[in-house]
Amino acid sequence: MSLRQAVYGNLSGMDEPRTITVELGTRSYPIVLGHGLLGGGFDLARHIPGHDCLVVSNETVAPLYFEKLRANLGTIAIESIDLPDGEAFKTVDTMSTIIDRLVDIGANRDTTVIALGGGVVGDTAGFAAACYMRGIPFLQVPTTLLAQVDSSVGGKTGVNHSKGKNLVGAFHQPLAVLIDTDTLATLPERELKAGLAEVIKYGAIADEVFLTWLEENMCSLLSGDGDALAHAIERSCELKAEVVAADERESGRRAILNFGHTFGHAIEHCLGYGEWLHGEAVAAGMVMAAELSDIGADQVDRLRNLILAAGLPVEPPALGAAKLLQAMSRDKKIQQKALRLVLLNRLGEAVVTSDFDQAALELLCDTSA
């Protein structure tokens, strides 16, 4: 038993696996959620169209879960590559390293890439799979809370550029997402909290009832309660699957999933990737977006207090308005040179809009100076 298992207890949270389907016609795929799924608890091989695969992981996750994953793959021929760990390595160079490995092993169009790890591994491996031979099969096995509730679902893949977050990438849907909640037992506490930022986001943008549940159960989530975590993951995946099914390529409604991210990505970029975790930056960004929204101060305070209860930051670091606004100017939601933000009509209902007070935005960003 690991130290975190001893401190945080049983992370099982469910007796039988649950399946959520991302409805995309012929490209629909399952999100399978449960405990004990790695180590042979789920037949992942049936989602692999060919006879071989490349498992992409990192130096932290591979020693913990690679051998367990092997037991899920039956007679599939397995090659692997382990990346350096950290957001600083989410680059074109790292993606090229994966492609080099695919070339070296003689991968064909029916070779499957399996991402075993957090969001950096999933995004980078998925982008390599999207590019190699113009697209090869791809599976997600996320091992962090943030990846389980967000980055593994929806087909967004990509890497960072020196000028901005996730500026290089492609939409490439996985064939399946396998979420084993037992992997959270080895997740550092700081990363668990960072993942909760994305969970809170779903309640803020689309489900006020879920937001209330989070308020009532935050202590259980932070203590690693299996039932609470399982429900939070399942509901988050349901909400994301609904949005992605309606707008796969973010031409409209899907952009609401970026609530807090315009500010958050700018914070990450300005600090240099890695000083703040993605979820920490998004947490502060959600409060900033709420403050710019036309909602009552009581609703802003409610969101701020929930984020504080999760042990996350509610204010940006001291960056200065000019630097933060410059980084925001490269946001992917910009249309016709106009910045669009995800704001709130109320808690539980988000909107993408360019109709906001520019002076108020500048003043909000200036509070970080």
Image (cartoon, grey):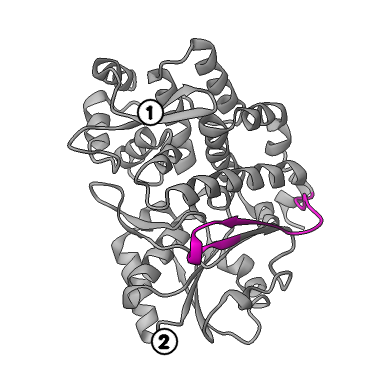
On the image, the x and y values in percent for residue 113 come to 47, 73
Of the numbered discs 2 and 1, the one sitting upstream in the chain is 2
On the image, the x and y values in percent for residue 199 come to 57, 39
Q: Which residue position is annotated with label 1?
A: 317
Q: Could you tell me which residue is drawn at 37 percent across and 19 percent down?
A: 292
Q: Could you tell me which residue is drawn at 45 percent across and 36 percent down?
A: 282
Q: Give the residue type at disc 1.
A: Pro
Looking at the rendered structure, the secondary structure element under dot 2 is loop
Q: Residue furthest top?
A: 297
Q: Which residue position is annotated with label 2?
A: 105
Q: Is residue 207 magenta?
A: no
Q: Give the residue type at disc 2.
A: Ile
On the image, the x and y values in percent for residue 134 come to 32, 74
Q: Does the magenta stretch include residue 15?
A: yes
Determine crowd level at label 1: few under 14, some 14-19, many 20+ residues with C-alpha closer than 10 A.
Answer: some
Looking at the rendered structure, the secondary structure element under dot 1 is loop
The picture quadrant where one finds residue 306 is top right
Q: In this view, does 202 lie above or below 247?
A: above
Q: Is residue 171 visible?
A: yes
**52 lies left or right of 268:** right
Q: Could you tell me which residue is drawn at 72 percent across and 31 percent down?
A: 217
> Where does the N terminus fall, quadrant-wise?
bottom right
Q: Residue furthest right?
A: 15
Q: Is residue 358 above or below residue 150?
A: above
User: What residue span does the magenta drawing correspond to?
Assistant: 10-30
Question: Which is closer to the viewer, label 2 or label 1?
Answer: 2
Q: Is residue 147 above or below residue 365?
A: below
Q: Is residue 304 above or below residue 183?
A: above
